[in-house]
Amino acid sequence: MSLVQVERAGGIVRLTVSNPPLNILTCGVMQELTAALGGIERGERAVVIRGAGKHFSAGADIGEHLPEKGPAMLETLLALFNALHEVPIPTVAVVRGACMGAGLELAAACDLLVAAEEAKLGVPEITLGVMPPIAAVDLPRKIGAARAAELLYLGKTISGKTAGEWGLANETAPDAELDARAEALAGRLAGFSGAALRACKRAVQSAAQRPIYCDALASAIRVYHDDVLPSEDGLEGLRAFLEKRKAVWKER
């Protein structure tokens, strides 16, 4: 059974993560997303990414962060975000419910983000003794160093409404109106010239020095691989979460 549903209509590609109840981004989900993002066709003008049901995504699979699976997970994570940045047309994240950890990294890496006012967004990795490598690159660029520090260093969770005020979300709406708002945005993109949209995105990526950005992503992943995966505190935090107990930090 597919973990990512793909629907194509009217120049819009709709990708729905379907891994209930929280749409956890397992390696399997990330691989399917990567494949779908790599299959954009001529004439398509927008990609919309959402989660099935009540949540966008509560994040990655904690068990896949443990040392025996961590290196493969990091390779899969990097492949997904490289694929996302290779998409030649605008990408839109539609966020409701939980949008945490790797879920927020995925949403924030999209070109546009539409959030339910009641949604919960954050990167709580620091509370587990680890860190969010993609967010460490993306969030300071997107919302500034000070706001990013609140999320990255304090593990703060914010509402969709606050995400709009901080500039993380382009639009916010009550949950009941979210889908209509997102479809209106995607429909507006679909009404433009696909050639113009692709040219505009190439120009944006060129101005942002995309190769340097991709190098930054790879560098952040290396920090996680070299410093976090082998760390005793990282392992303790992940195990404490899985065992539902308070972590005991050893500072190493």
Image (cartoon, grey):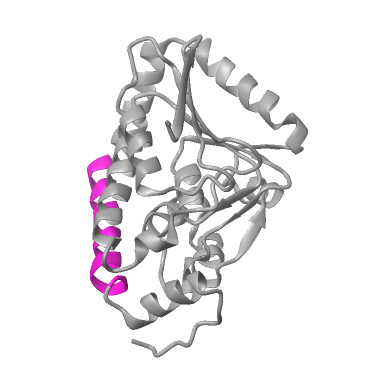
* Direction bottom: furthest residue: 250
Note whether residue 134 is visible.
Answer: yes
Note whether residue 216 is visible.
Answer: no
Q: How many marks?
A: 0
Residue 135: image location, x then y, percent: 43, 56
> In front here: 252 or 220?
252
> In front here: 166 or 233?
233
Residue visible at 57% across and 47% down in the picture: 168
What secondary structure do most residues of the magenta stretch adopt? helix
> In front here: 35 or 214?
35
- Taking the image as shown, residue 190 lies to the left or right of residue 156, namely left
Residue 156: image location, x then y, percent: 60, 65
In this view, 178 is above or below 97: above
225 in the magenta segment: yes
Residue visible at 23% across and 51% down in the picture: 215
- Residues rendered magenta in the picture: 208-229
